[in-house]
Amino acid sequence: MTALSNGHAANNSSLFKIPPIKFTNLFINGHFVHSLSGNEFETIDPRTGEVIAKISEGRKEDIDVAVKAAREAFDNGPWPRMSGAERAKIMMKWADLIEENLEELAALDAIDAGKLYHLVKVVDIPAVANCLRYYAGAADKIHGEVLKGAREFHAYTLMEPIGVVGHIIPWNFPSTMFAAKVSPSLAAGCTVVLKPAEQTPLSALFFAHLAKQAGIPDGVLNVVPGFGPTAGAAISSHMDIDKVSFTGSTEVGRAIMHAAASSNLKPVSLELGGKSPLLIFDDADVDKAADLALLGILFNKGEICVASSRVFVQEGIYDEFEKKLVEKAKAWVVGDPFDPQSQQGPQVDKNQFEKILSYIEIGKQEGATLLTGGKRVGNKGYYIEPTIFSNVKENMRIAQDEIFGPVLALMKFRTIEEGIKSANNSRYGLAAGIVTKNIDTANTVSRAIRAGIIWINCYFAFGNDIPYGGYKQSGFGRDFGMEGLHKYLQVKSVVTPIYNSPWL
């Protein structure tokens, strides 16, 4: 398919040869199995709206079987009882196998999620392997500490795996999120039941196949595709799951937290919605700032929790910035994710496509000015033009709601204090960006914004060693870094009396 741009589509098919779909069943206790109900659901190619494959649909009864396998593997299996070095060796082998299958895995995310193939191949899949290696390197460094008590006791702490972990991951970064959840929990010695998003199950099932090849023992990793109200709800409320980690919408996060509390009071970590601000100050390089703002909203077609969907520009450079931003947006290439010219692929599915278009209409109705975009691209698939609104008021829905698409709300501010106040005027607090040459401005603003990660003169600067998570209704708990490992560990204190010691 030729790249699509400025609303003109070419409908000839992609020249890329799509690999055959090898894994469509549930992966439970080391084997691919049909769901107990025999039900299947379709996974759709967002480039065309056509069916890629039929996937076994996991439901409560399948989650029960997977949890039973994970519980047996945790309570009686070798994985939690291996040394950290032994677990690391297997995880390293798994990472090598992922790299050996890099192109096929990248193709699965491209056809399942509409992600750019060339980017998934050089960024997402290598990042999965590196995430596994990062936490494999930490597996033999899980240590407690010796405590000097104030009384006549000797005390120390142990850091023990929390148990069976339920992971529910989203569709926008299916491979990255798989690695971010599975890598630290396995390094900690936990066992896992993972539900991939129903829109994007293909890469998770392939990763499970490679885990088996690498030597992950049966029952340690279980992958059960299905829907949120059935499979996801079963994980959240399961009495034999010890911890739930979820990435997705704030609305679903609330439901998961309620189910966890109502069942066995399992701890929950949530990475939820975002409406991240990008503040651009008068001293910024306007051209570079426009590039950063465009990347911040159009990367992964805006389907990213930390997208810079609210851009605040100081009044001294606002007019110049707006002009450059619109020029760059109009030149942005929307097209087939397998075309190396494409900068933006299709939205993940029809529902998301229609939701984004409905928000564009809401923006118009609320009185915002549509500077560019606002329409679908072509007549096939779920492609949307890069869309920029100006004259946006902070109380408008397009400035408050997470749209999760290529829609940017552009606003103006005068002073640092006004910019900080506007940035914090959100129920979310996941990320923020600052563009300035003034270190005092950067320090002041970064400390004042209520968000889990602040990027100064950069955006999307993630790393395995950089903790990531939210404030406010963007959730709690952190992925990546050592914080991402510690949330799958319990701290146990062990205390013994000291008799006749010359000192405490």
Image: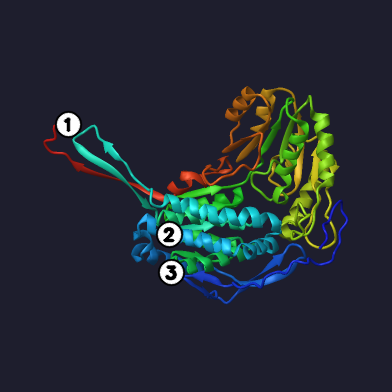
* Above or below: residue 313 compared with residue 156: above
Which residue is under mark 1? 503
Work out which quarter of the rendered image holds the N terminus and state it.
Answer: bottom right
Q: Position of residue 254 (x, y in %)?
A: 55, 49
Q: Position of residue 383 (x, y in %)?
A: 79, 56
**Nearer the camera: disc 2 or disc 1:** 2
Real-space CA distance between mark 2 and mark 1, rounded to the nearest whole angstrom: 43 Å
Work out which quarter of the rendered image holds the C terminus and state it.
Answer: top left
Residue type at mark 1 is: Trp
Residue 35's image quarter? bottom right
**Mark number for residue 266?**
none
Q: Are marks 3 and 1 in contact (CB under 8 Å)?
A: no
Q: Are marks 3 and 2 in contact (CB under 8 Å)?
A: no
Front-most of 175 and 2?
A: 2
Identify the element where label 1 is drawn. Answer: loop
Residue type at mark 2 is: Lys
Q: Residues within 10 Å of mark 2 (few under 14, many from 20)?
A: some
Q: Position of residue 308 (x, y in %)?
A: 69, 40
Which residue is under mark 3? 218
Q: Residues within 10 Å of mark 1 (few under 14, many from 20)?
A: few
Identify the element where label 2 is drawn. Answer: helix
Q: Residue at x 73, y 39 (%)?
A: 293
Which residue is under mark 2? 89
Would you say 139 lies left or right of 36 here? left
Way the structure is coloured? rainbow
Q: Residue at x 35, y 60 (%)?
A: 82
Real-space CA distance between mark 3 and mark 2, rounded to the nearest whole angstrom: 17 Å
Q: Residues within 10 Å of mark 3 (few under 14, many from 20)?
A: many
In this view of the protein, can residue 369 be seen by the observer? no
Query: Who comes first in sequence, dot 3 or dot 1?
Result: 3
In this view of the protein, can residue 295 be seen by the observer? yes
